Image (spheres, helix red, strand yellow):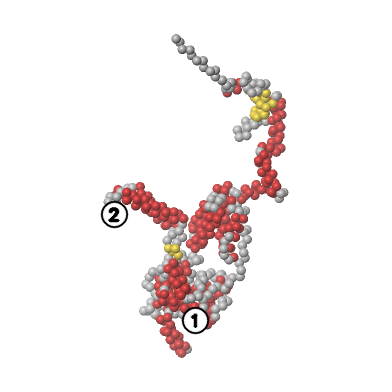
Amino acid sequence: MHRQRKAKPAMKHKPKQPDRAARNRRKYHTDEYRGWKLRYIIPKPGDRHTTPYWLADNCDKKARKRLAADTRADAAQRVDDEMGELEKHGTAHKIDDNQRAAVKRAETVANGRATLDEIVAFWAERHPVDGNKIGLGSMVTRFLNKREELGYRPETIRELRWKLTAFKDALGEKTPVAGVWEADVERFIAGRKGQATTIRAWRKALNAFFRFCQKEGAISKKVNPAAAVEVPKVPPRKPPATWAARDVESFMRIAETQAPEMVAGFAVLWWAGLRPAELCGQYGLQDDRIKEAKKKLKQARTNFEAERLRLGMGKGRGGNMRLLGATPEAQALKDARKELAGLVAKHGGGVMPGLQWGDICLDDPEEPDDPVEHFITVRGETSKTGEKRHVEILPNLEIWLRKYRKIAGPVVTNPTAFRRARDKVVEAMKGARWSPDVCRHSFASYFYKAYGERDRLAAMMGHTAQSREIEKHYKDSAVGLADAKRYWAIVPDSEKAAVEAETRKARKGA
């Protein structure tokens, strides 16, 4: 018996779409009119249209538009209407409803004070293309690197780095430079603590930074967000803080007993007027790239030690060092050391040495008749102005230096040890208050009162001939002449009796 085959269900076929060739055959005639294509199309069976028609096509890939009409004249008329609208209103008729609403909101906010074109021009000036791409963090790094290349003092660079780091952390490291407005700077400065001088220093740092951004083309030359920020007016400057001669003498007596290794440094501050950084030096400024290189070196060492243990070599030098040296971890450690050494050589990071005993010129005590001038040399790399200068060694300072003199080496071991010794002595004085540069101010005030030589003092302080600092701060100082004489008579306790006897002898001879 023959099996009866089941009939397959009838499949529903979609009407076959005409291929491209068939569609092209429908375009019987094409004309050019005002940049548009006018095509006469005769529909084929299966097309949506059933009657012949004309189609106008602008053939614009980005904003294609097609217009249908019954006759060629109607198609040409529709093209004329479209082109007329474009010539009359530009591209405004192409914006959608959301864009129209945005334009209306902008006009409401402007309230007739500016046109939309003026608003856009104002915004474009303050938002250059580069400024919208460059973040605050990147621009701050470029600014600080440029200051290092220009040879700015380490203290200045450290101050700028501290202030600008706080600024970029507050606004965001990736915030576009061109997106920072005057209100942002004003809010940031308002949140700073301190007196008027401190607030003005914050604005000065930010102003310098944004001027650099203008020069680099990151923001418009017409706009500096920090320039117009209002800051408090600096009140009249107070007289520089000084210590009475009896307090200075008490300080030195305590220092002789509790910190004898620092006495020579204290004497140089009190009776030569050097700045603390000129005496002690300072720790070098560590570039961010050096910090990153140190992290890489630390990680490379950890990986190297792990590989050493994996090879069963322990921490000693036993085992196959050649095998260990050929590992990727050993090569990575070598590269990390080389990278760090190169960055330190280029960007610094060590300790800037302070005053050395070789910088102090005293005559040979075995040849007192040798006419050698007594002076201290302040090197240019430690000086605030970057220029070398000589400071005269006065009689009482010479006595201090001779007693605590060393053959060579630094006068002060390091800045931290010196500061700790100073705080220890001040604490032992019970009620004394240390203020910045009090030694320098005391030196200048007592020198002017005792000697009255303005140019001589300015040269020792490192001021220029045109500077008015001496007249402003020290000429009318409140220190008395008797106190000044006592100040310049302070000597080590062991030398005090001899100096007094010599003074009495000189008076009798007179």
Quadrant assignment for the N terminus: top left
Whether residue 202 is visible, yes or no, is yes
| Residue 1 falls left or right of residue 121 | left
**Which residue is label 1 attached to?**
486
Q: How many discs appear?
A: 2
Residue sitting nearer the eye, 121 or 415: 415
Q: Which mark is residue 317?
A: 2
Q: What residue lies at 29% left-to-right and 55% top-to-bottom? A: 316
**Which class describes the residues within 10 Å of circle 1: few (<14), some (14-19), or many (20+)?**
some
Q: Secondary structure at mark 2?
A: loop
Whether residue 361 is visible, yes or no, is no
Q: Earlier in the sequence, mark 1 or mark 2?
A: 2
Up-down: is 392 above or below 118? below
Three-letter amino acid code at the position of disc 1: Arg
Residue 79's spot in the image, x, y percent? Answer: 69, 30
| Residue 182 falls left or right of residue 146 | right
Residue 98's spot in the image, x, y percent? Answer: 65, 40
Q: What residue lies at 68% left-to-right and 46% top-to-bottom? A: 106
Residue 36's spot in the image, x, y percent? Answer: 65, 30
